[in-house]
Amino acid sequence: MRVLLTGGSGFIGSHIALLLLENGYDVLILDSFINSSSNVIKRIKIYLDSKDIKYKLETINGDIRDKKLLDSIFINSINENKPINIVIHLAGLKSVAESLIKPLNYWDVNVLGSLNLLLTMKEYECYSIVFSSSATIYGLCESLPIREDHKISPVNTYGKTKVAIENMLYDLYKSNKNLWKIISLRYFNPVGAHPSSMIGEDPIGIPNNLFPFLTQVAIGRQRMLQIYGDDWETNDGSGVRDYIHINDLAEGHLASLEYLNSKDSCLEFINLGSGHGYSVFQIIKQFEISTGCKIPFSIQSRRDGDIAKCYADISKAKRLLDWTPKRSLEQICLDGWNWQVNNPNGYS
Ligand SMILES: NC(=O)c1ccc[n+]([C@@H]2O[C@H](COP(=O)([O-])OP(=O)(O)OC[C@H]3O[C@@H](n4cnc5c(N)ncnc54)[C@H](O)[C@@H]3O)[C@@H](O)[C@H]2O)c1
């Protein structure tokens, strides 16, 4: 089984790549390295070699918007008698804040890039895809836990591009219901790191998300954690989110591949989260208990577009994919912390 993994050098992609390789999949990573380091690939290889695992991994440095490159990838795969069976599509831009400042970049990379990929897949008769969508598409949360049939109403450009891609996938499936096998996974907040500390999250610049910010404060790379609002309607006033261990998320992809293999055709939109909501203060407390680090923080005013609570109903993933998240919040804190301690400057 050969998998084309776009964005495979990024935070999520690298953990999926490692898991697929450990499970005997042949993996072809396509990444422009615009938001990741080529050291990721080296680390994956070192880890697999250290475990004496034989693997098939190829990496191409390129952009999903480059149609000629995509054509050549699919043609070469066919000519070499190792056609691409499934695509896991993660490549894209992911910062909510940046998407509001540079909206056209997001429409270009995320939407046109995905269109390009789907056009190429159709041309070379590769009809199976797992797509990285996001809980951002639900926008203001009207009911909890959030089910997949919750209203779709994104409040930022990033979320709108994810909805546009989901719509594209929907139309494609409807155009020939016997042909396409499609799963769109709506991630909540993937955090933590591989327990080996060989791969983890290494954001460029100041982290946008709570967890990498927290670990960078703990290691002394950032002075203080900023908490946006302590007057939300939650138990302790801080925002509540659904944090899922990155390896649980990666296993959700493995389960998705197995599901697609068992089907003649399908289209499913599936939440991947832990199913639990934790407040920012709860995360800080657990992190301090698990690691012994003290986290200084300051309270800032709420950010535009933020909401009080958001966590997933994951019953559909359990039912369809036979998948359940296994790792605790403590494990998340420990693995995230170990990654940071062993790699204080990330991959550089
Ligand atoms: N991390 C999250 O919290 C989160 C939540 C929901 C959804 N997602 C989605 O999951 C996917 C992966 O997220 P991540 O956290 O690993 O992000 P990431 O930035 O670490 O990984 C994305 C990868 O895509 C590559 N890339 C970007 N533009 C490209 C292009 N035009 N052509 C080829 N490669 C390109 C980047 O270099 C990077 O390696 C993204 O689509 C993101 O929107 C992430």
Image (cartoon, rainbow, N blue to C red):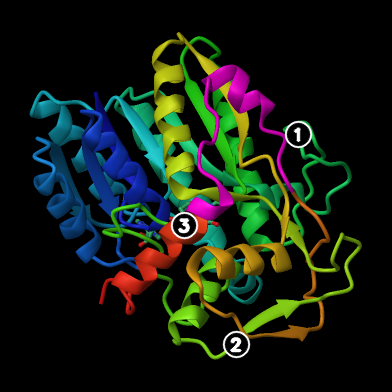
Q: What residue type is disc 1 on?
A: Arg
Which of 16/236 is in front? Answer: 236
| Residue at mark 2 to residue at mark 1: CA–CA distance | 35 Å
Q: What span is colored magenta in the figure?
A: 311-331
Is 80 located above or below residue 191 in the figure?
above
- Residue at figure coordinates x 36%, y 34% from the top left: 87
In the picture, measured across the screen, residue 128 lies left or right of residue 318, that is: left
| Mark nearer the N terminus (2 vs 1) | 1
Label ID, residue 192: 3
| Mark nearer the N terminus (3 vs 2) | 3
Residue at the spot of label 2? 224
Residue at the spot of label 1? 147
Q: Residue 309, can we see it? A: yes
| Residue at mark 3 to residue at mark 2: CA–CA distance | 20 Å
Query: Under tag 3, what secondary structure?
Result: loop
Q: Quadrant of residue 72?
A: top left
- Residue at figure coordinates x 38%, y 71% from the top left: 340
In the picture, measured across the screen, residue 315 lies left or right of residue 168, that is: right
In the picture, measured across the screen, residue 286 lies left or right of residue 218, that is: right
Is 314 located above or below residue 258 in the figure?
below
Q: Quadrant of residue 25?
A: top left
The tally of labels here is 3
Q: What residue type is disc 3 on?
A: Gly
The location of residue 77, given as percent across then percent down, is 16, 32
Q: How many neighbours does mark 2 have within 10 angstroms: few (below 14), some (14-19), or many (20 or more)?
A: some
